[in-house]
Image: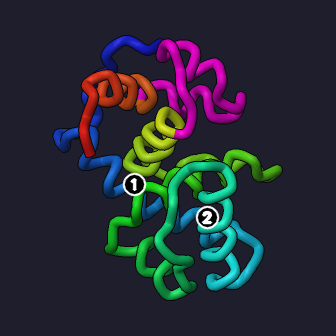
Amino acid sequence: MCERPDETSSRPFYARVLAGSSKLVGHWLMLGQADPDRLAMILADTARIAKLGEPESTPDGDTLTHWSGDATPPRWAARTALFLLVQMPAKPLPRDHDEACAWAYCWLHNREFEACETAHASLPEHLRDCLAAPLAEAWQDYRGLRLI
């Protein structure tokens, strides 16, 4: 399950993570049941409380909308969006491979895991199949000790 996956894209894994991070934040913006200003506040407050990052300030709805488009969001925003999405009763799934790469990357950076298999087993059941290959790629990236 967590061996080296077949390359599904000619782009490097981390480039797919960056592209998918905007989509991940956009997914939160789309599924969150509040206006963008409130969703931005929830995102920043959750990041601080869950210790997923320390936003310098609370973004506004326009910033959140910008991050979900062409701008790459800060890591804390993507990590927190994933944290919130996996708790939703609707059980959302990544909408494409780039977004799945961002979900897998954030999953590994939100908690500590001894092995890829442990990280995979700890995923909510509805995510295990669709994140298996991206999680294996994320594990290789993570174990490569990327300093970003």
In the rendered image, residue 138, in percent from the top left (x then y), is placed at 38, 31
Within the magenta stretch, is there residue 113? yes
Count residues near mark 2 (Cα–Cα under 10 Å), then give few for <14, some for 14-19, many for 20+.
many
Residue where numbered disc 2 is placed: 28
- The quarter of the picture where residue 145 lies is top left
Measured along the vertical axis of the image, is residue 67 above or below residue 10?
below
Up the image or down, 99 lies above or below 62; here it is above
Residue 86 magenta-drawn? no
Count of labels in the image: 2
Relative side of 99 to 141, left or right: right
- What numbered label is drawn on residue 86? none
Gap between marks 1 and 2 measured at Cα: 13 Å
Q: Is residue 40 above or below residue 76?
A: below
- 11 relative position to 102: left or right: left
Please report the residue visible at 46 percent of the width from the left and 61 percent of the height from the top: 23
Q: Residue at x 58, y 55 (%)?
A: 80
User: Of helix, strand and loop, which mostly describes the magenta segment?
Assistant: helix
* Residue at the image position 30 percent from the left and 48 percent from the top: 16
Tell me which residue sits at (54%, 33%) in the image: 130
Identity, as a three-letter code, of the amino acid under mark 2: Trp
Q: Residue 64: where, in percent of width, then height? A: 51, 77
Q: Magenta part of the protein: which range? A: 110-133
Q: Under tag 1, what secondary structure?
A: helix
Sequence-wise, which precedes: disc 1 or disc 2?
1
Type of amino acid under label 1: Gly
Q: Which quarter of the figure has residue 45?
A: bottom right
Q: Which residue is mark 1?
A: 20
